[in-house]
Amino acid sequence: MIAQVLVEGLILGLLLMGICAFGIRNGAVGMVHLYHQDVKDRCVELGLTTHEKISKNSKLFKTICVPGYVLYVLICVYGVNGAKGFQEGFWQLFVILSVMNLMDRFLVDGWWVGHTKAWIIPGTEEFRPYITGEDKRKKWIMGTIGMAVISAVLAGIAALVMH
């Protein structure tokens, strides 16, 4: 079962990377809503986008991705894997989300954004690194604690609904 849950986490991580790749298909400015405000403002100053487009893309990202990820993990854990109750659901949810979080930290933030040119927006290079040390600390803490909290909430809701 652990191998299956790990694979489900890898698939979710690949889905995240696919969404990012789609978002930057015409340049990193397509995902500028993930950057700091100074980068967003510079992109607007340079005429690369507008605050309205940034806001729209941010809302679209949140309204599609977050529910999509939640639906995916719930289907995997309770539909495919047949988890019963809180404990069984919690550990599977936590592993799947943690694998995705690790892929996001190491592959997306660490390698893709940090060491390739794919996420560089011309005219904003002085704001690099786009993901600062402080950002990384926050993402590690929130990613770890956040995934545990999300897993507990989802497992709790599923346990109540299934009871």
Image (cartoon, rainbow, N blue to C red):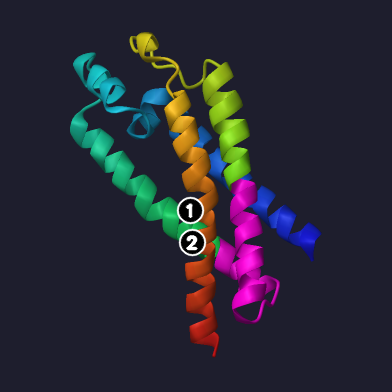
Q: Magenta stretch? A: 73-100
As drawn, is 131 to the left or to the right of 79?
A: left
Where is residue 125, by image quadrant?
top left
Counting from the top left corner in percent of width and height, residue 160 is at 49, 84
Residue count near mark 1 (Cα–Cα under 10 Å), binned few <14, some 14–19, many ≥20: some
Q: Amino acid at mark 2?
A: Ile
Where is residue 129, by image quadrant?
top left
Helix, strand or loop at mark 1: helix
Relative height, residue 117 to residue 79 (above, below): above
Main SS category, magenta section:
helix
Counting from the top left corner in percent of width and height, residue 70 is at 50, 62
Q: Quadrant of the N terminus?
A: bottom right
**Tags 1 and 2 touching, CB below 8 Å:** yes
Which residue: 20% across, 16% down?
A: 45
Which residue: 47% across, 22% down?
A: 119
Write down the residue under mark 1.
146
Counting from the top left corner in percent of width and height, residue 105 is at 57, 36
Write down the residue under mark 2.
150
Where is residue 55, by image quadrant?
top left
Is residue 159 magenta-colored?
Answer: no
Helix, strand or loop at mark 2: helix
Residue count near mark 2 (Cα–Cα under 10 Å), binned few <14, some 14–19, many ≥20: some
Relative height, residue 60 to residue 36 (above, below): below
Q: Quadrant of the C terminus?
A: bottom right
Q: What separation in Å lies between label 1 and label 2 (alpha carbons)? A: 6 Å
As drawn, is 155 to the left or to the right of 64?
A: right
Question: Is 41 or 163 nearer to us in this picture?
Answer: 163
Q: Amino acid at mark 1?
A: Gly
Residue 43: mark? none
